[in-house]
């Protein structure tokens, strides 16, 4: 099955690295226009060039903005809308893994996590919604993690923020369905990305990244980490016409690792 986005315009937060960049490449390769948003301008420029190599001729816009603020969300949306005329697809993907013992999570950390991973999705959702509703076509994917359904010990604040993101997804899906705005969540397990490369570097091991990740992956049900391309292919399916009757799901993309369905 050939999946196509038929020129639809996507705003992808965290599109300069890891899963967001993989989604941007997949969308651009499927005929979509992509606006990638992140804070680091240099990394954005590298990502933009990579996407253009992966999908020659694709329309790509790099936007430097901090989406943990209202102003950053507004700037990102305004630039994408100005460049493409509209935003048809929103991928709320930017995030970091913040977790630790409950008593050690400060107010500042809670707030930071909520601003980046929950309020950004709320604010950007509000910005893209009126246009999607007027055109009777929209797709929103909230990228969460499997802790949203199965919060582990020492999973705060991230698992709590992600659980709220799952509730947000369902509220948006219930309101959006009649307008053909389909909202879903993708719950990440462990997938190869820049954040794992940073962990490998911090571990100071002598092993190569591939060997290090390969060993960690042996403990997972499929004996390996997920690949960003696999994650991106799932997002592409959900945002294509093939995903046209899927709304309000929280899909584990974790190779079977989550204890709950
Ligand atoms: N990969 C996994 O195994 C895994 C597991 C569970 C959940 N997830 C979730 O999946 C999503 C993608 O993860 P990843 O592994 O691809 O992460 P990653 O490689 O660390 O990339 C994160 C992206 O988000 C951007 N970002 C971070 N803070 C931002 C901010 N305030 N404003 C704008 N952009 C910001 C980063 O760019 P800048 O730093 O330049 O801003 C980067 O583009 C995240 O929400 C993550 O929590 C991933």
Image: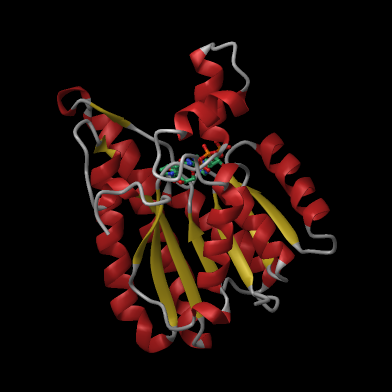
Q: Residue at x 43, y 51 (%)?
A: 255
Q: Residue 242, how many percent across, how many down?
A: 54, 80
In which quadrant will I find the N terminus?
A: bottom right
In which quadrant will I find the C terminus?
A: bottom left
Say if residue 261 shows up in the picture: yes
Q: Residue 16, how many percent across, how many down?
A: 63, 44
Nearer-the-camera pick, 188 or 28 = 188
Asked if residue 154 is positioned above or below residue 57 in the image, the reply reads: above
Asked if residue 123 is positioned above or below residue 172 in the image, the reply reads: above
Nearer-the-camera pick, 66 or 160 = 160
Q: Residue furthest left?
A: 103
Asked if residue 232 is positioned above or below residue 153 in the image, the reply reads: below
Asked if residue 170 is positioned above or below residue 243 in the image, the reply reads: above
Q: Residue at x 46, y 68 (%)?
A: 140
Query: In the picture provided, is 228 more to the left or to the right than 190?
Result: right
- Colour mode of the rendering: secondary structure
Say if residue 131 shows up in the picture: no
Q: Residue at x 25, y 36 (%)?
A: 155
Q: Residue 237, how many percent across, how many down?
A: 55, 70
Query: In the picture provided, is 13 more to the left or to the right than 248?
Result: right
Query: In the picture provided, is 110 more to the left or to the right than 238?
Result: left
Q: How many marks?
A: 0
Nearer-the-camera pick, 51 or 108 = 51
Q: Residue 152, how many percent across, how many down?
A: 21, 38
């Amino acid at each position: 099955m050939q999946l196509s986005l038929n020129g639809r315009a996507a705003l992808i937060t965290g599109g300069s690295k890891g899963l967001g960049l993989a989604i941007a490449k997949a969308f651009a390769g499927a005929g979509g226009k992509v606006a990638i948003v992140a804070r680091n301008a240099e990394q954005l420029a590298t990502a933009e060039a990579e996407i253009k190599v992966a999908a020659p001729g694709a329309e790509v816009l790099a936007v430097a903005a901090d989406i943990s603020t209202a102003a950053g969300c507004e700037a990102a949306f305004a630039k994408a809308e100005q460049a493409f005329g509209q935003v048809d697809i929103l991928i709320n993907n930017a995030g970091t893994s913040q977790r630790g013992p409950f008593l050690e999570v400060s107010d500042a950390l809670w707030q930071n996590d909520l601003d980046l991973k929950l309020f950004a999705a709320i604010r950007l959702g509000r910005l893209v919604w009126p246009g999607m509703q007027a055109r009777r076509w929209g797709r929103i994917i909230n990228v969460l993690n499997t802790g949203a359904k199965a919060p582990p010990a020492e999973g705060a604040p991230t698992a709590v923020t992600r659980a709220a993101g799952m509730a947000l997804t369902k509220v948006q899906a219930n309101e959006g369905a009649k307008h053909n705005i389909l909202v879903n969540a993708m719950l990440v397990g462990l997938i190869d990305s820049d954040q794992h490369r940073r962990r490998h570097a911090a571990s100071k091991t002598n092993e190569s990244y591939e060997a290090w990740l390969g060993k960690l992956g042996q403990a997972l049900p499929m004996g390996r980490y997920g690949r960003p391309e696999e994650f991106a292919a799932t997002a592409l399916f959900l945002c294509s016409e093939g995903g046209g009757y899927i709304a309000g799901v929280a899909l584990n993309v974790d190779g079977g690792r989550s204890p709950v369905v």
